[in-house]
Amino acid sequence: MEKLHTTPVHPGEVLEDELEELSLSQSDLAQHIGVSLESIRRLCQGQQELSASMAMKLSRALGASPQFWLNLQNNCELSQIDEADYTQIQSIAV
């Protein structure tokens, strides 16, 4: 199985590290940005994908750009793709 990327980092892993560095609990963050604690827990555990809305909320609360958070999510998703599943698709662009 050929992967596009070999070291995916889920945005939840980065969020968890950020919370630890700032000495913030998941509960504190959830309350601060107006989301459920369960949503933050699932994100940190890699069980939930990061939405554009959540990226904006994290950006406002933690300072990194929304694009930073969305890029983490996109890279994580791309790393899960097996390129071999797409070899039958030929380019139609000239």
Image: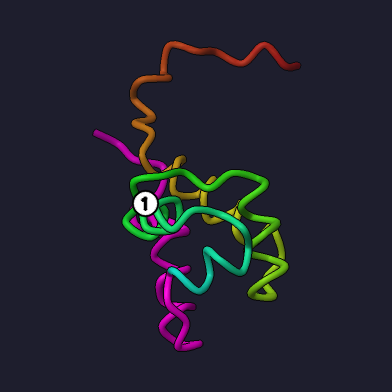
Q: Which residue is at a point 41% across and 42% down the rendered structure image?
A: 4
Q: Does the magenta run of residues contain 67?
A: no
**Residue range of the region highlighted in magenta in the rendering:** 1-26
Question: In the figure, is residue 50 to the left or right of 27?
Answer: right
Toward the viewer: 71 or 21? 21
Question: In the figure, is residue 93 to the left or right of 8?
Answer: right
Q: As shown in the figure, which amino acid type bears the numbered disc 1?
A: Arg
Toward the viewer: 23 or 80? 23
Q: Which residue is at a point 61% across and 69% down the rendered structure image?
A: 32
Residue 54 vs 31, above or below: the answer is: above
Residue 28 vs 48, above or below: the answer is: below
Residue 50 x, y percent position in the rendering: 53, 48
Dividing the image into 4 quarters, which one contains the N terminus?
A: top left
Q: Residue 64 occupies which quadrant of the picture?
A: bottom right
Q: Residue 34 occupies which quadrant of the picture?
A: bottom right
Residue 49 vs 54, above or below: the answer is: above
Question: In the figure, is residue 50 to the left or right of 93?
Answer: left
Residue 78 vs 41, above or below: the answer is: above
Residue at mark 1? 42
Q: Does the magenta run of residues contain 5?
A: yes
Residue 92 x, y percent position in the rendering: 67, 11
Dividing the image into 4 quarters, which one contains the C terminus?
A: top right
Q: Which residue is at a point 41% across and 71% down the rendered structure image?
A: 16
